[in-house]
Each structure stands twice: as C-alpha cells, then as structure tokens.
Image (tube, rainbow, N blue to C red):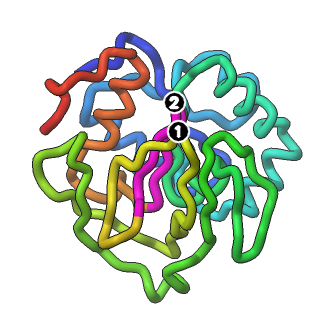
Amino acid sequence: MTNGHKTVGILAIQGDFAMHAKMLDRLGAAWKLVKHAEDLEQVGGLIMPGGESTTMLKMFAAEGVGTAIKDFAAKGKPIYGTCAGAILLAKDVSNPPQERLGLIDITIERNAYGRQIDSSVQTGECPELSDHPLEMVFIRAPIIRRVGEGVRVLGRCGNLPVLVEQGNILAGTFHPELTDDPTLHRYFLGKLSGDYTERHKL
C-alpha cells in the first residue's frame, strides 16, 4: 500500500517513534522524523507517538513545535496521536491538568490505568476498521473520560472508548505500533491520501 506519495511525519522529540517507523516500513509508506517546526513543511500527515507528554510540552515550547502543529492541523492535514500523543491533542486533560493543543474535543485522564507496572495487553474492537478484534497495548495509558459532539468513537476496549476521530484528528490511548497488526496505521495512511474505503479493512 502507498499513501498517495505523501510522506508521513513522525514526531521524534521523545517517545517510541522508531516503532511507528517500522510499521510504516511494513506498509511501504514514506516517512520522515519531525524534530523541528520547519520539518512539518515536508510532510502530509503527522504521527505523535507515546512517551512523556510533559517532557514533549517543554520541547514544544522551546522549539515552537506546538504552534506549528496547530497550524498544520488548521490546514486539514491528518494527525494521529497515540497515548501521550492523544493527551497532547485533547481539549481537556486531568490528573493533573496540563497544557495541550486542544485539537480534538475530548477530556482525557493521564495515567488512568496506573503506573508502568500496571500496563497490560488487552483485546478491543474497532468494527468500522477491522473485522477482527485488535490487540491493544496499554502502557501508563490515559482514559478518555468525555467525548464531545462531533467526535466519532472508532474503537472500544471494555466499556471505554480507546480510539476517537474528529475530522483530520485521530487519537488512541493504546500503542498499535507495538503489535503485528497494521490496521490503525493503514487507516491513517488512508486519511493521508484521502481515499480510505472499505477495501482497506482487514
């Protein structure tokens, strides 16, 4: 699969960006590490990986990356945030509150599953994207506590929403890059090329 010859940016300030790159390699997609605001000019979409959201925020401020990402989103370019990336994209953050980009109308609670020792691998459903259950890796994961009007819930694990979408913004509380299933990255590439259809469904 290609992504319409558009390059995917992977935010590489901090976090597990290398595993996202490996998944994109599997799908034959072009990618570029994004470390500075000007790097966004060279990509058609952006993946914001897991990591430590407060550390990322400090580097956003120092590098001007946060403002650049907001401008990037305002142009309609797709962004996919996983775990810490989802926290940064949220409109509201709790436990404790922190600065955020406010690009998707959700309230998210940080470290809601507990500490690193409480991390787990579970099975969830994304019926619009996959005919089979998905393995979902939660590491110090946040929980989406509120979903605003206009936000679609694409995935659930138990009774909780774990994958949500609003326009060009996609946010998930788990780590698809740590599994062998390319469903989520394939879906994001479809958003990037603007031609996602049922044929991408596994």
**Residue at left offset 31%, top offset 67%:** 157
Quadrant assignment, res 98? bottom right
Residue 185 x/y as whole percent: 34, 39
The secondary structure type at the circle numbered 1 is loop
Q: Residue furthest top?
A: 5
| Disc 1 versus disc 2: nearer the observer | 1
* The C terminus sits in image quarter: top left
Disc 1 and disc 2: Cα gap in Å? 8 Å
Callout 2: 10 Å neighbours few (<14), some, many (20+)?
some
The type of residue carrying mark 2 is Gly
Look at mark 1 in the image and give the residue it sits on: 150
Range shown magenta = 161-173
* The N terminus sits in image quarter: top left
Task: Tell whether label 2 touches label 1 (CB within 8 Å).
Answer: yes
Q: Is residue 112 magenta-colored?
A: no
Look at mark 2 in the image and give the residue it sits on: 167
Callout 1: 10 Å neighbours few (<14), some, many (20+)?
few
- Residue 129 vs 115, above or below: the answer is above
Quadrant assignment, res 54? bottom right
